[in-house]
């Protein structure tokens, strides 16, 4: 493949990559903050608020008995009534963060109007400020509102980092560069998990993790020095054929070769995103609900550690295998492994069992492998001249499917077992889609 000229000088490429990795690292930190701290925060804020009926002592006693010895039929009915509000508040907080992060991806386009550097700095300021403010919230509605604003900042920050890599590297280097920033996101989850494993996160001690989550402001000097402004946009295509190809909202755009490729790209991108956001990471709040009342508050952090570190391994393993093995088989087997791990963990295991961490680690590995394969596949599927537009569209539309599932979860008022069993089947959908996806060699892939 012919190497394209880079948008920025080679001497600045490392700093640009470092900035993008930093953005995704702190995005992973925010995701970990949301998953590790939200349930404890909701329980504490409901206990402090006079707006809701909530018997904290009853809830805590039933939670402890449910995790350790099981409940009688009468106690189960009481448990459902007293825990429903906690489940709803926790799920709404997750949904608020993910949905607003999706909107933040759209706000990244402000970089065209006011400059990318100013937009990214503003996103980091918003993210840091409102995360710190969340640490002193005194009511549930305050926490939800502040997490919405935080999600907007995260969306702008991580998507700008993704775009930097798309625009500054030639097609041959893009997959490994994107793998690096994705691994940085996993390491962000890992770092907070490691911290939570040694410092308890409980309803009486949860504010510190939000304070730690306000640390992305350290990126501001690096952003101001290293983030370049967008290059001038190319002139619009002049030929009728090109105009029809790019107009994806029309029927001609959908049935065009580029349109069909983007549809499959969006579908295959949505599968690991939904799997990570709505299935794998549901293990963390589930472990919180079971471990904290049983005297094991660090269990949720251990699950985050297991999921994140094997996810990093899975990303680079699949990316390397995509060079010399059948790409279709890699994605199929990754989805099959994730499906098996998710269904077994949510149906036949539970957080207090010794094997639960192993299943969380397996799910993290296979979910990460799907991401690693995806970066390699999209770089081959989308023509080089449309890499920025096509990969942006695939990830934005794929990400938007995650909050759509959260909306369903809010109506179901559940954050663990039923939702995990149901959303785990998304990996089976990926196994079907990849059988018909274009641009995947059945024989060994060749180097570009």
Image (cartoon, grey):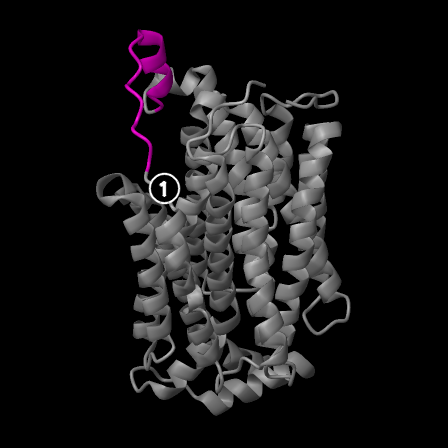
How many numbered marks have been drawn onto this rendered protein structure?
1
Near-viewer residue (129 or 172):
172
Q: Among all residues in the image, which is located at the extreme bottom? A: 57
Say which element carries label 1: loop
Q: Quadrant of the N terminus?
A: top right
Q: Is residue 244 magenta?
A: yes
Residue extent of the magenta highlight: 230-248
* For residue 50, side relative to residue 394 (left or right): left
Please report the residue visible at 72 percent of the width from the left and 38 percent of the height from the top: 333
Q: Relative to 178, does residue 43 appear above or below in the rendering?
A: below
| Residue 371 sits in quarter | top right
Please report the residue visible at 42 percent of the width from the left and 39 percent of the height from the top: 397
Q: Quadrant of the C terminus?
A: top right
Task: Characterize the local packing of mark 1: few (<14), some (14-19) or many (20 or more) Cα atoms within 10 angstroms.
Answer: some
Mark 1 lies on residue: 228
* For residue 290, side relative to residue 88 (left or right): right
Q: Among all residues in the image, which is located at the extreme left? A: 113
Q: Is residue 89 visible?
A: yes
Q: Position of residue 192 (x, y in %)?
A: 56, 68
Q: Position of residue 295 (x, y in %)?
A: 64, 85
Q: Is residue 282 visible?
A: no
Near-viewer residue (252 or 168):
168
Near-viewer residue (121 or 26):
121
Q: Position of residue 248 (x, y in %)?
A: 36, 23
Q: Position of residue 172 (x, y in %)?
A: 58, 28
Q: Is residue 414 magenta?
A: no
Judged by its main secondary structure, the magenta piece is: loop
Q: Among all residues in the image, which is located at the extreme front? A: 11
């Amino acid at each position: 493949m012919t190497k394209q000229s880079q948008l920025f000088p080679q001497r600045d490429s490392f700093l640009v990559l470092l900035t993008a990795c930093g953005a995704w690292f702190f995005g992973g930190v925010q995701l970990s903050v949301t998953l590790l701290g939200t349930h404890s925060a909701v329980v504490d804020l409901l206990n402090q608020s006079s707006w809701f009926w909530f018997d904290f002592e009853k809830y805590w006693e039933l939670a402890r008995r449910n995790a350790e010895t099981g409940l009688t039929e009468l106690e189960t009915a009481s448990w459902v009534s007293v825990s429903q509000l906690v489940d709803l508040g926790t799920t709404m907080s997750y949904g608020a963060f993910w949905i607003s992060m999706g909107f933040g991806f759209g706000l990244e386009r402000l970089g065209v109007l006011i400059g990318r550097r100013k937009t990214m700095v503003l996103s980091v300021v918003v993210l840091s400020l409102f995360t710190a403010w969340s640490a002193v919230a005194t009511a549930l509605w305050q926490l939800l509102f502040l997490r919405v604003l935080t999600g907007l900042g995260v969306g702008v920050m991580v998507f700008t980092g993704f775009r930097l890599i798309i625009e500054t590297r030639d097609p041959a280097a893009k997959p490994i560069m994107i793998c690096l920033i994705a691994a940085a996101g996993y390491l962000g989850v890992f770092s907070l998990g490691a911290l939570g494993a040694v410092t308890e996160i409980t309803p009486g001690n949860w504010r510190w993790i939000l304070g730690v989550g306000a640390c992305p402001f350290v990126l501001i000097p690096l952003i101001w020095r290293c983030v370049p402004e967008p290059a001038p946009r190319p002139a619009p295509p002049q030929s009728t054929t090109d105009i029809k190809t790019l107009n994806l909202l029309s029927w001609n755009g959908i049935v065009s070769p580029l349109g069909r490729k983007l549809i499959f790209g969006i579908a295959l991108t949505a599968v690991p995103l939904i799997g990570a956001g709505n299935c794998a990471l549901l293990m963390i709040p589930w472990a919180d609900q079971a471990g904290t009342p049983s005297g094991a508050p660090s269990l949720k952090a251990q699950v985050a550690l297991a999921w994140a570190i094997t996810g990093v391994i899975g990303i680079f393993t699949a990316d390397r295998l995509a060079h010399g093995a059948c790409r279709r088989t890699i994605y199929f087997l990754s989805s099959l492994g994730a499906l098996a791990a998710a269904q077994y963990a949510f149906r036949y295991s539970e957080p207090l069992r010794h094997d639960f961490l192993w299943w969380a680690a397996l799910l993290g590995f296979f979910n990460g492998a799907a991401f690693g394969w995806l970066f390699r596949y999209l770089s081959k599927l989308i023509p080089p001249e449309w890499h920025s537009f096509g990969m942006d569209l695939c990830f934005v539309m794929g990400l938007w499917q995650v909050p759509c599932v959260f909306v369903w979860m809010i109506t179901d008022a559940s954050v663990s077992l039923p939702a995990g069993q149901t959303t785990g089947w998304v990996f089976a959908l990926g196994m079907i889609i990849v059988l018909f996806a274009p641009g995947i060699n059945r024989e060994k892939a060749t180097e570009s």
